[in-house]
Image: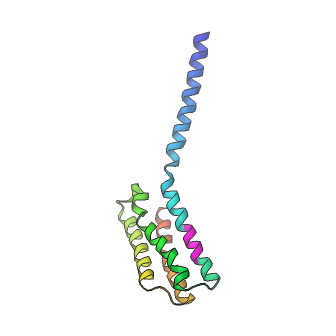
């Protein structure tokens, strides 16, 4: 009887450990989620600046710089897709849009709106192809 109880306890502990391990593997790492969360927050900040008519270079440049720096982390953050030509192309398009915006910061809210739309379009193209 004692052996049967120990076997059942062992099976239960093994089952629980397997569930915990599978859940941890399914969640992956926090790195890609963190990159996307910060990029999303910066995009919301840019859109908020547009709505508030705060479109000077000093208002927009810090957010654009943050987005550009995070753009360098896209391929490393999403390792299974780093060799996918579509993913690399989308990441390059985002970086190109950000480089253009930083090289010639928008002078007014109309130009800033075009820049934000271009950046958002690059994001949406990638999300359309890769986000589940």
State the image coordinates of residue 64 (x, y, percent, origin top left). Answer: 49, 76
State the image coordinates of residue 34 (x, y, percent, origin top left). Answer: 52, 59
Span highlighted in magenta in the image: 40-46
Residue displayed at 40% across by 65% down: 87
State the image coordinates of residue 16 (x, y, percent, origin top left). Answer: 58, 32
Q: Nearer the viewer, residue 30 or 130?
A: 30
Question: Which color mode does the image show?
Answer: rainbow
Which image quarter is the N terminus in?
Answer: top right
What is the tally of numbered marks visible in this picture?
A: 0
**In the image, is 5 to the left or to the right of 72?**
right
Q: Is residue 45 magenta?
A: yes
**In the image, is 124 to the left or to the right of 89?**
right
| Res 30 seen here | yes
**In the image, is 6 to the left or to the right of 123?**
right
Residue 100, compared with residue 91, is above or below; it is below
Residue 33, compared with residue 101, is above or below; it is above
Residue displayed at 48% across by 57% down: 32
Which residue is at the far front? 58
Residue 95, compared with residue 84, is above or below; it is below
Residue 17 sits in quarter: top right
| Res 132 seen here | no
Residue displayed at 52% across by 40% down: 22
Residue displayed at 34% across by 59% down: 83
Residue 101 sits in quarter: bottom left
State the image coordinates of residue 57 (x, y, percent, origin top left). Answer: 51, 84
Q: Nearer the viewer, residue 122 or 29?
A: 29
Which residue is at the far top? 1
Magenta-drawn stretch, dominant element (helix, strand or loop): helix
């Amino acid at each position: 009887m004692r052996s049967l109880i120990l076997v059942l306890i062992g099976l239960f502990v093994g089952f629980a450990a397997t569930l915990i391990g599978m859940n941890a593997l399914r969640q992956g790492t926090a790195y890609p989620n963190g990159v996307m969360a910060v990029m999303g927050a910066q995009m919301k900040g840019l859109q908020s600046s547009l709505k508030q008519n705060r479109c000077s270079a000093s208002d927009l440049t810090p957010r654009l710089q943050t987005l550009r720096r995070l753009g360098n982390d896209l391929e490393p953050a999403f390792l299974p897709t780093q060799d996918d030509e579509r993913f690399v192309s989308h990441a390059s398009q985002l970086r190109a849009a950000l480089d253009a915006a930083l090289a010639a910061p928008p002078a007014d809210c109309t130009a800033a709106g075009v820049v934000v739309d271009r950046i958002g379009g690059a994001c949406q193209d990638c999300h359309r192809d890769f986000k589940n």
